[in-house]
Image (cartoon, rainbow, N blue to C red):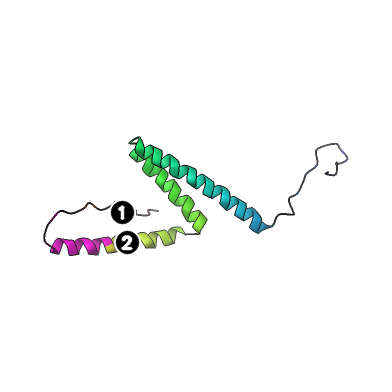
Amino acid sequence: MGVEPPNGSPSIHLVTSLSAETLAANSHARLRLILATLDQCRASLVNEAEHETADLLSVTILQLRMKLKGVTDAELKLLCEVQAAQEQAQASRSQKAPRGRRRRGRPVLKLVK
């Protein structure tokens, strides 16, 4: 039911009935669906022993989650620094403890600019 322009070209419909909040919610919903798909892909890659590719996809997943949650690069960097300091403190405490069977820690993610 658009108004035909005089030159016969197709009419342009402007989406004015949707609020910015609705558009943002729809965008976030689509991004959450994409995130779920990426998580499934990463799990499949791990099952196929494609660990390097799965790790790369994990970085993409992290970036998308940060966007959805509104986490900045500076906040992530601070979190990594705090976690690294805690792990270093824990490692120094465990060195003072009697040597026994130790579990290998996860690699630390560092944000590099």
Image quadrant for the N terminus? Answer: top right
Mark 2: few/some/many CA within 10 Å (<14, 14-19, 20+): some
Give residue 87's quadrant in the image. bottom left
Mark 1: few/some/many CA within 10 Å (<14, 14-19, 20+): few
Q: Which residue range is magenta in the image? A: 87-101
* Circle 1: residue type: Val
Lateral position of residue 89 relative to residue 7, left or right: left
User: What residue is pinned by disc 2?
Assistant: 83
Q: Is residue 84 rendered magenta in the image?
A: no
Lateral position of residue 69 relative to residue 45, left or right: right
Identify the residue at image location x=77%, y=46%. 13
Main SS type for the magenta part? helix
Give residue 92's quadrant in the image. bottom left
User: What residue is pinned by disc 1?
Assistant: 108
Kindly report the distance in space between the C-alpha atoms of the residues bearing marks 1 and 2: 8 Å
Query: Where does residue 48 sit, x and y in percent of width and height?
Result: 35, 35
Identify the residue at image location x=49%, y=47%. 35
Q: Nearer the viewer, residue 18 or 77?
A: 18
- Which residue extends farthest left? 98
Identify the residue at image location x=46%, y=43%. 38
Query: Where does residue 46 sit, x and y in percent of width and height?
Result: 35, 39
Q: Nearer the viewer, residue 18 or 10?
A: 18
* Circle 2: residue type: Gln
Q: Is residue 99 rendered magenta in the image?
A: yes
Lateral position of residue 43 relative to residue 86, left or right: right
